Amino acid sequence: MIQQFILNGLIAGGIYALVALGFTVIFRTVKFFHLAHGVVYTTGAYIGYTLAIQLKLPIVIAFLFAMLSAAILGILIDRIVYRPLRKKKASNLILLLASFGIFIFVQNLIQLIYGAQILSLRTGPVKEGYEIFSAIITPIQIIILVTSFVLMITLWIFIRKTKLGKAMRAVSDDPMAANIVGINPERIIMISFALGSALAGAAGFLIGMETNLEPTMGFNIILKAIIASIVGGVGSIPGAMLGGLFIGLSENIGIAWLPSAWKDVIVFVILIIFLLIRPQGFLGIKTKKENS
Amino acid sequence: MEYILHILVICGIYSILALSLNLILGYTGLVNLGHVAFYATGAYISALLTLQAGLSPWIGLLAGGLGAALIGIVVTLPALRLKSDYLALATLGAGIIVYQVSKNWTSLTRGPMGLPGIPGFSIFGIAFDSTWSYLILVIVFVLITLFIINRLVTGAYGRVLKSIREDEVASSVLGKNVNKYKFQVFITGAFFAGLAGSLYAHYITFIDPSSFTIMESMTIILMVIFGGMASIKGSVAGAVILVVIPEMLRFLGMPSSIAAPLRQMIYGLLLVILMMKRPQGLFGKFRFT
Amino acid sequence: MELLKIEHIKKSFDGLKVVDDLSFTLEKGKITSLIGPNGAGKTTLFNILSGLCKADSGDIYFNSNSIFNKSPYYIANLGIGRTFQNIKLFPQISVWDNVLLASQNHSGEHFIKTLLPTKQVHEDEKNAEEKAMECLEFVGLFNKKEYFAENLSYGQKKLLGLAITLATGADLLLLDEPTAGVYPETRKKILELLGQLRDQGKTILFIEHDMKIVMDISDIVIVMNYGKKIVEGSPENVKNNQDVKDAYLGRGNGSS
Ligand SMILES: Nc1ncnc2c1ncn2[C@@H]1O[C@H](COP(=O)(O)OP(=O)(O)OP(=O)(O)O)[C@@H](O)[C@H]1O
Ligand SMILES: [Mg+2]
């Protein structure tokens, strides 16, 4: 029985890790909690619904277009709202509140277009699952698991190995210095939003194939993604993945004993414990309050 | 007429919520995305104590405020030592958790079915059972809130709060125990939000989780920012305007499946525009940068 | 009489020793200047003294109380005030309120007492106002008291920072480059003020890059380099010290 919970935890954890990773890629360049990332995830799922279910496009095409639209939405949010605020040197508090506003706006736009009812990206009947280690896994779940891990590893390699990835790291460490050596921080921020948002869109699509879509689905996920990145260490790429898996596993193993409605409560208890005992997370460096 | 009185009661309850959030957000500069958690806690505690334990609503009211303050302690304690973004996250988490508990702890809260038949207030055998008498009760509480929050933000104490908002490091080297102030402000704000929750529960006589979603936090934040951060009259004005305008939209006769998301969309957009163009709101002086 | 005693303070950031086994004492009523090239660790030492930065080891006594790694507010309450190199004020608050914030043990800053104001609260506020007026007049900013602090000029901001620190009534003033980047007239004024403060019995530790100022005003000079104290003594002694010349020549000229 516990094997099943672990497997479910891995699948959920993969999704969380994907969103947390996207969040982290963006956080590293803009340094504030981009809450609207959650609604980018929702958008990916709903665009996927329109393409795959309403227009009956092949699922792979729908998936890629969902990622693309999420990326475009991410870039637009940055261009229209964050960038002008950055120019004005607005504080994190302003950015956070603006981000909250964007979240509410897009979520309700989706609700207006698609209605509040629950939709699904499932194209056929649920197939018989395979049994491994006495846990059942369906073909869809295998696809979700594999896709999320492939995306994560691709992104990780991209950031570590390519020139662009190195430029992104440079901007994250010291934007001023990066600017001096000829890297344009604004361009890098745009690329981060594109990449990070595409991951969120992908995650939204994947979850839609397994469970359901509802307009409010982005709230929970963004909270869990942020908590995952805190648990892993804010700003750390491997930390985001580790944190996502940790959160997915803990909530699913936790409900082996508790009623499943308490999943979210388990996650927040983890957050509180981490904030109290290890605010820098597993892999992060100590967050210091600035002083001078 | 009855309808107008009803709107005024709701304006009063939201004024208390906006004023208490303004103490935290506008004056002290702490982002609180989960004010609804305190509001819900007050409503549920007060309703449950009167329904299940048969206590007087007045005791429920006090317990609701104190219970909300306790949630305030639990939220701020771990997050205060860290950067303010973490506090924002912790408060958002509190908003979600309280909502989840009210929805899922069905043996206590009856979950989505809600708690009906919450008794109203009465004093010396006189019941506040008509809308106009309840309005008087609410006005009394608005005045109490106004009085206390005004005291806190105008004198030397309020000066310290503003200094924390402006630069906590500079404030601490002037000998101010910054965390102590943040803590006091959070607990006070939570207490009043709890009172507002109780006033709401005993007025509507029925509560369910749908009144306490995170959208409610959004509405209260918008009231504060729209009216003006760090402005007392701004909070009251913001509350009144944002209660009355959607009511007027109701007369346009849109079906609620369109009106509700449309209203929220406008709220979200308004928040973004205010942040970009006029962070100080209608009456505020403080621009939050 | 010794007011401040620093013993073997050490602090490193990511393995870089920024303050390295530093010890010295400050006599009451003297002006001591702290000099050294950029990055010598002077500001970091101030941050440790005011509790904003936790040192790795050592000890610090103020009036024989240990203040080592205590909270900033606790240290401030004992009577240590400071200014910041990159000026820290409360921008969207009036100049007047900026200075009033410096008052210590103001009962109106107490939660319960502000709700139920006693006579004490009014008295404390009156005292704070008198002190604020005195300090603003001292730096010549009284006519700007209604301005938001963010609307002052750079030099006026420096003066306001000084006025705030003065208004705390602190016995020990830690001033981080109080004259850097200000107009010569203003600089002269600030230096006069420092002299007057010493005559009032205040103890001053200040960081300064301008050698002429250092030589003119200091009773004692302490020279730091790479986190270590290399020389301590009277201005004349320090001026002629070979190590000091080496430190400045070897690491570029820190003076302006
Ligand atoms: N919070 C910090 N984290 C990492 N390194 C730091 C930190 N604060 C200071 N440093 C480093 O410590 C060294 C000393 O800095 P400090 O500001 O104390 O020098 P300073 O003597 O005041 O120089 P200046 O004359 O330029 O003001 C510098 O190399 C600086 O980069
Ligand atoms: Mg310095």
Image (spheres, rainbow, N blue to C red):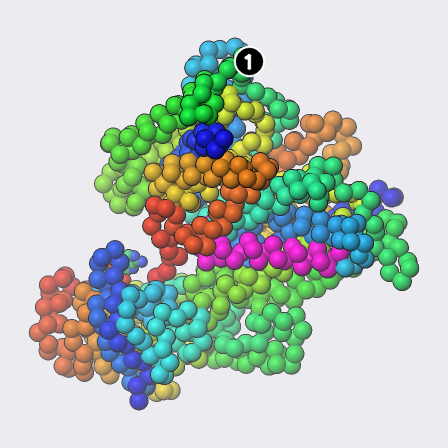
**Residue visible at 61% across and 78% down?**
C121
* Label 1: element kind: loop
Counting from the top left corner in percent of width and height, residue C153 is at 40, 63
- Outermost residue toward the bottom in this view: C1
Q: Which is the main secondary structure of the residues drawn in magenta?
A: helix
Tell me the quarter of the picture where residue A54 sits. top right
Q: Is residue B181 above or below residue B86?
A: below
Most foreground residue, B162 or B228: B162
Q: Name the residue under label 1.
A: A125
Asked whether residue B19 appears in the rendered view, the answer is no
Asked whether, in this view, residue A181 is left or right of residue A1, the answer is left
Tell me the quarter of the picture where residue A235 sits. top left
Counting from the top left corner in percent of width and height, residue B265 is at 61, 33
**Residue visible at 46% across and 58% down?**
B81
Q: Is residue A68 above or below residue B226?
A: above
Amino acid found under the numbered disc labelled 1: Pro
Asked whether residue A173 appears in the rendered view, the answer is yes
Q: How many neighbours does mark 1 have within 10 angstroms: few (below 14), some (14-19), or many (20 or more)? A: few
Give the magenta range. B60-85
Q: Is residue C38 above or below residue A23?
A: below
